[in-house]
Amino acid sequence: MEHKQLNVEQPFLLESGQVLSRVQIVYSIAGTPTAAQDNIIWICHALTANSNVADWWSGLVGEGKLFDPDRHCIICANILGSHYGTTGPLAMDLATQERYYHNFPAVSVRDMVGVHELLRKHLGIRKIHTCIGGSLGGQQALEWALIQPHLIENLVLIATNAQHSAWGIAFNESQRMAIQTDPTWKERRPDAGHAGMKTARSIALLSYRNYETYMKTQSSKDTDQTDNFPASSYQQYQGDKLVKRFNAFSYWILSKAMDSHHVGRGRGSVVQALQQVKSKTLVLGIRTDILFPVEEQKFLATHIPDAHYEEIESLYGHDGFLIEADQISQRYNEFVNDTFRISQY
Ligand SMILES: CC(=O)SCCNC(=O)CCNC(=O)[C@H](O)C(C)(C)COP(=O)(O)OP(=O)(O)OC[C@H]1O[C@@H](n2cnc3c(N)ncnc32)[C@H](O)[C@@H]1OP(=O)(O)O
Ligand SMILES: N[C@@H](CCO)C(=O)O
C-alpha cells in the first residue's frame, strides 16, 4: 500500500461559506486500476481512523482478503479535519502563519466528500466500482452517491444513517462538554484538551459497545473486589490510548461534522434525497449497535431505490463494523454476485 500526499494550492469553499486557502490530502492507494476502471474500491473511514486502511480494516483489505490489491485498486483518503495529515486544525493557516487550532472552520460531511472529489479528479478516476464505509465513513459514502449520482456503481453503507440522530448528537455534545472542562482546552498547543478528550473517549466507548460487551469482557471474577474494577481500568486505558494518537481539536471538528450530517439539507427532505440514490446499494446494520440502531439502516434501505438490507452480529455493538470482517465479506460477496438467499428485511 502506497501512502501519498496531494497538495491543492487553491482555495476550497466549505459548505458554511468559509474558505480554506489550500488543502492537503493524505491518502493510500494499493493495486492498479484496470483500463476500464472497473476495479476501484474507495473506502471512507470513520471518526478516528486514517488512510492506512490495511491497518485498521486488516480483515477486509490485503492479499487474499475481500479487497485485494492483486485484483482491486483500493483507495482511502484521510478526511478533512482529521489528525492524520489531511488539512485539519493543527495545519498552518496561511492568513496568520500560525496553526488554526480553535479557528479551524466548521466542516460538514459534504465538505469531506468535496475533498475526496479533489483527489478523485487528480487521480483521473471516472468510475468507482464500490464505495464503502461504516459510521461517519458511511455518511460520506452516502453523501458522495448523492453529490455524484453516476460515479459509484455499488454503495455499501454500514452502521450509518441519513441524518445524525438526536441520540448521537447528545453523545457527541457530552464528549465536547468533557473537552470543555479541561482547563488546557483554551490553550493553543497540539495537546490542549487531552485530559478532556480522554473522558470524551470513555463516554464514546459506552455508545460504541453495549451492556453485553461490558458484561462479557469486563466483569470482575473476584468476589472480594470492591474497587479498581476491570471496567474502570478499561475506560481509563481506552481514553489514554486515544490521547496518544489524536488531538482534541480534530475530535471536536469531526464530531460537529457528524452532528450536521443530514442528507435532506437543501434537497427537500431526507426521503426525497434518498430516493435520488442511483447506486446499487447494500445497507448493513449491526443488531447490537446502540449508537446507530438498525432502525436507521432499515430506513435507508426503505427509501434508497432497490437497496438491499442485511444484519450482522457482533459482541462489539457499533464498533462491530471495524471488527466483523468475515460477516461483512460474506454479505458483500452475496451482494455483488446477487446471490442473497433470503433477505433479512
Ligand atoms: C494511527 C493509529 O493507530 S489509528 C488506527 C487505530 N484505530 C482506528 O482505526 C480506529 C478504529 N479502531 C477502533 O476503534 C478499535 O481499534 C477497535 C474497535 C477496532 C477495537 O478496539 P480495541 O480497543 O482494540 O479492542 P478492545 O475494546 O477489545 O480493547 C482491547 C484493548 O484494551 C485493553 N484492555 C482490555 N481490558 C482491559 C482492562 N480491563 N483494563 C485495561 N486495559 C484493558 C487490552 O489490553 C487491549 O489493549 P491494546 O489495544 O493495547 O492491545
Ligand atoms: N471507533 C470508531 C468510531 C465509531 O464510529 C473510531 O474511533 O473511529
Image (cartoon, grey):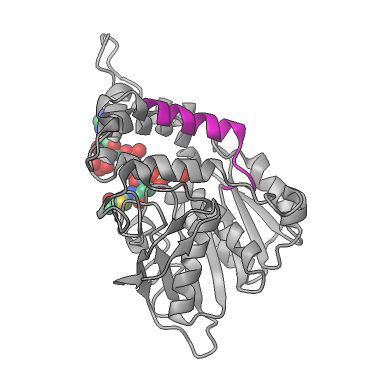
Q: Quadrant of residue 166?
A: top right
Left or right side of 224 for 25: right
Predominant SS of the magenta segment: helix
Instruction: Assess whether residue 174 is covered by the magenta stretch.
Output: yes
First to last magenta residue range: 160-178
- Whether residue 286 is visible to the viewer of this picture, yes or no, is yes
Estimate the x, y position of residue 293 in percent, counting from the top left.
60, 38
| Rendering coords of residue 264 (x, y %) | 70, 50
Residue 88 versus residue 178 in the image, above or below: below
Q: Is residue 336 left or right of residue 27?
A: right
Q: Residue furthest bottom?
A: 35
Residues 106 and 307: in front is 106
Classify 127 as above or below 262.
Answer: below
Residue lying at 32% horizontally and 51% vertically, measured from the top left: 83
Q: Is residue 290 visible?
A: no
Quadrant of the picture in which ligand 2 is shown: top left
Total number of numbered discs in the rendering: 0
Q: Residue at x 41, y 73 (%)?
A: 68
Which residue is more in the foreground, 6 or 100? 100
Q: Quadrant of the N terminus?
A: bottom left
Front residue of this view, candidates 147 and 151: 147
Task: Provide residue 316's location: percent of width, then percent of height.
Answer: 45, 39
Q: Position of residue 271 (x, y in %)?
A: 76, 50
- Place residue 72 in its image quadrant: bottom left
Relative to 17, residue 64 above or below: below
Q: Is residue 89 left or right of residue 80?
A: left
Seen at 26% across and 34% down, the residue is 194
User: In screen coordinates, is 43 left or right of 180?
Assistant: right
Would residue 177 be counted in the magenta stretch? Answer: yes
Question: Which residue, as the protein is rendered here, is positioned at the far front?
Answer: 95
Instruction: Please give the name of the residue rendered at 31% of the width and 20% of the height, measured from the top-left corner.
Output: 220
